[in-house]
Image: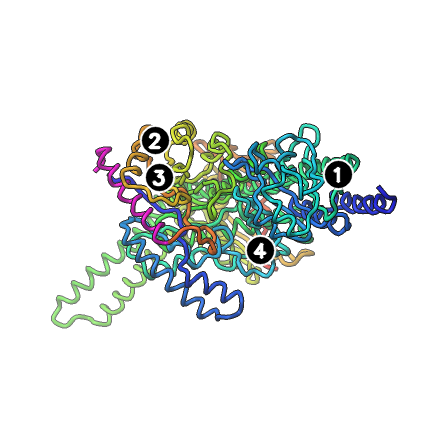
Amino acid sequence: MSDRRLDRRLRTFHTCIEALFQAGSEQELLQSICDTLVTGGEFTLAWIGYGEDDPGKTVCPVAQAGHGRDFLEDATFSWGGEARGQAPAGTAIRTGKACWVDDIRTDPSFSPWRTAALAHGYASCMAVPFIAGAFDLHGTLNLYSVERHAFDQSTLEHFAGLATCVTRAVMALRGHLADDLTSGVSALRASEERKRAQEALQQAHAELAHVTRVMTLGELAASIAHEINQPLAAIIADANACLHWLDADRPPLDAVRETLTAIANDSNRAAEVITRIRAFLSRSSVPYGPCDPAEVIRGVLPLVHPELRRHGIILETSLASDLPPVMGDRVQLQQVLLNLLMNAAEAMREVLPERRRLVVRSTVEHRDDGPWAVVAVEDAGVGFGQDAGPRLFDAFYTTKPGGLGMGLSISRSIVDAHAGRLWATANPGHGATFHFALPGMR
Amino acid sequence: MTLPTEPIGSIPRPPALIEGLRGFEGGRISQRELHTLYMSAVQDTIERFEATGSPVITDGEQAKHSFATYAIHGLETLAPDGVPIAFADGHIRVLPRLTAGPFRYKTPADVYLDLARQYAHVPVKQAVSSASALSLLYPQGGIRGYSREQYLQAVMAELEGEIRRCLHKGAHVVQMDFTEARLSIRLDPTRRLLESFVDLNNLVLERFSADERKRIGVHTCPGADRHSTHSAEVDYAELLPSLFELRATNFYVQLASEPDRERVLKLIRTHAKDGQRIFVGVIDPLDPRVETPEEVSERVFQAAQYIPVDRLGTTDDCGFAPFSDDTSRTRDTAFAKIRARVAGTALATTRLGLD
């Protein structure tokens, strides 16, 4: 081989080696190798074929470059043992060894394709199998030249070396296909599972919160029944009075009108209590929206009022008129406040009647990040000892006989979910104050 | 009880439509004219489908470019030089390659369903691409600023939305085409690629409730196109254990063209899970000869020896023209084969004492 030809081949190989490292996919690599080999000027056609396991044992072209692509479209090569398997392409796959045809015009192994090959100007060809150690791609690199006797043992060894490198690169790319997808899918799987776990936790939390709301209202049932019963009794009495008046020859219509108005007011009062209860018991969790803390307080106080009255507890309120709106779930925040009020009432049940005083206070705190709404529930009950302080918000911690110990734990979860804070302080005299602070809407 | 029977999806396009597609690509006819050809082909296909007596039909995928790329055909963020799929007869189909994000569908399957339901009088089944097939669009070298995870997330979101809309719009069943399952074993004999495919598709399927999944199926075959396939040489024993890990209810499994059907049925019996219904392929679209109803009946009867009849159904091995330019089969042959499937399944129903 002339120095010039060797130099040209080395340059071609250099470009091929670059492709081994740059190709993003198997197809890109194989096509790049074919393109480079034809551009190098030594060959007129370069193609790569893979052996199929079909009945005909077809050698299927997967990449090609150069003159005479239609030759490949019409030609059928096989890697089986019959006549169509005797060309270098099939033989190299079948035997795992490189081989060549010196002269297409005369070589009997190429007779099925001779006419077409000569029409395209091919005079000789060579096939090199893609094998690297234990890896066999079951394919060949096929090179066609316009010169007879263009191939020899040294050429074969050069291209066998290239084929080995290509084989290793293809195996690496195939591995990457699985690796890339596996890593992508694993990341997705982990992210989906985190999302599902979070959803399950939220669902469990919502269910638990609902159960505790039901339980809290169960504790209030007697008082609420009384609260509803009162207007109902008044309605009945007023209705009877109206009926009685209407029996008269000249009914006192002004009195009837006034009484019917009272009936309507009492009906509205009872309906309002029921509406509040139904809203409070709603199961569905709603997306957070703008929420007025003053409205939260106003919604809860009527529910707890009868219970406080029943136990002789005086309720005092000191409510700021400029509380900032917060982002949240009104029902959940009502649940927090109701829980604190019920705990306060419970704490004062055993103390002297004159000490039974409960204060609900709301204030605005201006912090670095803006205004916060702070709500405090102050009682004069039995308070909590130093030991109990850190455990107050633990799940299942309770000082109440028959209590579940979930109320404060759930309340803290709710407030945390609102990016707020719930805490307790012991009062200087008697009892405790529970506070929750919520950031105003930004 | 009647054994359910369903088609896979595609029917060869009428010559006028194929010519019209060429005309449109060559700029000789307008989008509007092409749409008229689509409508006409869908209408004719549905009429002929219903005439076969098939209790469930499809639109024959008349307006789809291909079973795998219908949703993305025409997107500007695709290059034509993606993963090549070599078929046994030597021809190659090349998947497109994604060149940039974000990824969105151009024409989701429910658009085709809307069109079909305008003409249909019986339940319509809708085939969709799989997340695993679409995963092959992402280049191995990556895309700057658009990671593989971002792409897969987008694929899953598009696919979920597409399936939900199809279910909501009344598709009898939504069938995810998973022909790359068998191909993946050819590409990666270690089966890691297959495991990733299954996991990815499950991430989509798990977004649906158990009730919704009763109307979702998966189709597997060795990828018929023209006169050949891309992965028939892959042994079902390599595929089926993983395939039945998919969280779908219905499985449409190519069987008629298998050289040893009994062996495959034994594999199905071993690996299919309770609650999974297996629609076995009783028609070979690649075989130019039209099967007789008796042959079909015999195939069903054989399958019933291995699959409980309350979990058995019949189907075609594959679509009759998964790619729009495939003219290897005629419409007449496709409908004659479907008629044979329907009649043969009815015969088998009687023979099994189910009616």
Secondary structure found at label 3: strand
Q: Are marks 1 and 3 in contact (CB under 8 Å)?
A: no
- Whether residue B88 is visible here, answered yes or no, is yes
| Secondary structure mostly taken by the magenta-highlighted segment of the chain | helix
Label 4 amino acid? Phe
> Residue A420: x, y in percent?
59, 49
> Residue B285: x, y in percent?
40, 45
Residue at point 42%, 49% (across, down): A284
Report which residue position mark 3 lands on.
B282
Q: Chain of mark 1?
A: A
Q: What is the magenta range? A: B331-355
Label 3: how many Cα within 10 Å (few below 14, some 14–19, many 20+)? many
Label 2 amino acid? Ile
Report which residue position mark 4 lands on.
B103
Report which residue position mark 2 lands on.
B307
Vertical order, A282 against A90 (above or below): below
> How far is the residue under mark 1 from the one under mark 4?
42 Å
Label 1 amino acid? Phe
Q: Chain of mark 2?
A: B
Q: Is residue B189 magenta?
A: no
Q: Nearer the viewer, mark 2 or mark 1?
A: 1
**Residue A159 badge:** 1
